Amino acid sequence: MNWTDERVETLKKLWAEGLSASQIAAQLGGVSRNAVIGKVHRLKLSSRGRATSSPPRQKKSSHSNAPVRSPRPSRPVTASVGATALQAQFDAAEPVTRQYLRPVEDVVVPISRDLKLVELTERTCKWPNGDPLSEDFSFCGNDAGETGPYCAYHSRIAYQPAAERRRNR
């Protein structure tokens, strides 16, 4: 299917009127919804004239017998622009922050032996120290035992329980 100048102009007009990609595809004929979406993005047609949501409700006067409703908490509003089409944007809502602290269990930070790569063995900790491109780059080098590539201290950092990883997101 070729996008002729007339079809592109029709697409622009229908998009500005607020029609959906499916509706535009049906009116143009011979083109899929995805083709319409692709062309809209290539043309960078982000602003569209679409119907807004209903106007906000106003409180009734105190003389009325009807109960007065309190304003609703803010809801996420989705934008339909580019790659962030489904990203939620919150209006006038303060973010809720939660901080989860891991219990401190007599944490002893080992003194690094600062081993170079050629000095590592199967039983030394391979936790990197510093920038790998700098000359003073080294590895922890403490005893890793047979449990893995890291000493006990660095294993607790590298391997967090799944429940704790989910909480930190």
Image: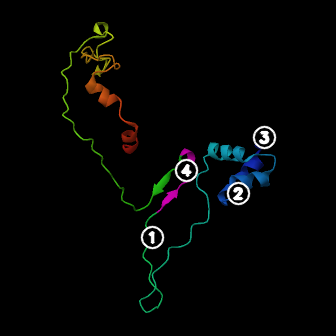
Q: Which residue is mark 2?
A: 14
Q: Quick check: marks 1 and 2 in contact, CB under 8 Å?
A: no
Q: Earlier in the sequence, mark 4 or mark 1?
A: 1
Q: Which residue is mark 1?
A: 72
How crowded pointer 3 is (Cα within 10 Å; few <14, some 14-19, many 20+) is rated as: few
Q: Which residue is mark 3?
A: 2
Give the residue type at disc 4: Leu
Above or below, comparing residue 64 to residue 12 in the picture: below
For this view, does 51 lie left or right of residue 67?
right
Q: Earlier in the sequence, mark 3 or mark 4?
A: 3
Give the residue type at disc 1: Arg
In three-dimensional space, the C-alpha distance between marks 1 and 3, rounded to whole angstroms, equals 48 Å
Q: Position of residue 101 (x, y in %)?
A: 27, 44
Q: For the N terminus, give its image quadrant.
A: top right
Q: Which residue is mark 4?
A: 86
Q: Position of residue 63 (x, y in %)?
A: 43, 92
In three-dimensional space, the C-alpha distance between marks 1 and 2, rounded to whole angstroms, equals 34 Å
Q: Earlier in the sequence, mark 3 or mark 2?
A: 3
How crowded pointer 4 is (Cα within 10 Å; few <14, some 14-19, many 20+) is rated as: few
Residue stretch rendered in magenta on the structure: 75-83
Which residue occupies the extreme top position in the image? 118
Element class at badge 1: loop
Give the residue type at disc 2: Leu
